[in-house]
Image (tube, rainbow, N blue to C red):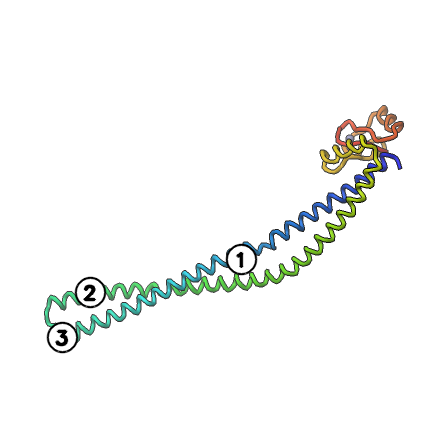
Amino acid sequence: MTIAKSLLSLQDTDQALALRRREYREVEEELKSEGGLPELRDSCEKIRVRELEAKVETARLESDLATLKTQVGELETRLYGGAITNVRELTAIETEHSAVRRNLAQIEESIAPAEVAAEHVHQQFEDLTSKLADKEKLWESRRVELGQTKTKVGTEFNRMLELRNAEASQIPEEDLARYNRLFRSNRGIAVVRVDRGVCQGCAVRLPVGELTRLRNSDGPIPCSCGRALLTE
Ligand SMILES: [Zn+2]
């Protein structure tokens, strides 16, 4: 095999290796992301806390309501029971009675919205919990699938890497070094063909002198674009 052909074959292998490597990384990243489950669990936990807070708030309002109702009852018993005849005392009780009634009315007004809010958060929590359960189930099979792909791609990669090294060992050191440098700097393209006198890398027509030089050379020659080595 000529050096040019060996380099082209090596390039095919290297490009395939790069694809496998990318595929492997994508699989790894997806595995790491756990299909967005951590974020969803986080949201679920936040909603759970909000639901608790809403429950506590409703319970507090209900307990206040009960206390105030008792107070109103007690004050009314004293007001209308007839046991108190002192006007000043009666006036004081009346004032307290109005104040407690006002508080009671306020609490009564707040309870319904608080219950609606609590119900809303509860619904959100339920929805999110079932969404999380669905996603966890889906992820479980996806995770297995990804694990298998990872192994497969990894094995394939290693096999190709061995092939690559075997191929590379057949190429003179200097050509290989030049190829490696170009392959890295030119995003995976180091050797390009010249088709009807045109460099397939940069689409520039080669001067006749260069074409002659290429034909007489036993290996690839650098293109004037500096990005690639040329072969026919
Ligand atoms: Zn070129």
Q: Are marks 3 and 1 in contact (CB under 8 Å)?
A: no
Q: Which residue is mark 2?
A: 96
Q: Earlier in the sequence, mark 3 or mark 1?
A: 1
Residue 214: give its label: none
For numbered disc 1, what is the local secondary structure? helix
The residue located at (76%, 49%) in the rendering is: 156
Type of amino acid under label 1:
Arg
Q: CA distance from mark 3 to mark 1?
A: 62 Å
Confirm whether residue 203 shows in the render.
Answer: no
The residue located at (74%, 32%) in the rendering is: 181
Q: CA distance from mark 1 to mark 2?
A: 50 Å
Left or right? Give the position of 197 relative to 152: right
Image location (x, y in percent) of residue 53: 41, 60
Q: Are marks 1 and 2 in contact (CB under 8 Å)?
A: no
Q: Nearer the viewer, residue 132 or 90?
A: 132
The residue located at (82%, 29%) in the rendering is: 221
Q: Earlier in the sequence, mark 3 or mark 2?
A: 3
Q: Which residue is mark 1?
A: 41
Left or right? Give the position of 139 relative to 214: left
Classify 10 Å Cα crowding around label 3: few (below 14), some (14-19), many (20 and above): few
Some atom of ligand 1 lies within 8 Å of the CB belonging to the residue at label 3: no
> Which quarter of the rendering shows the C terminus?
top right
Type of amino acid under label 2:
Glu
Type of amino acid under label 3:
Ala
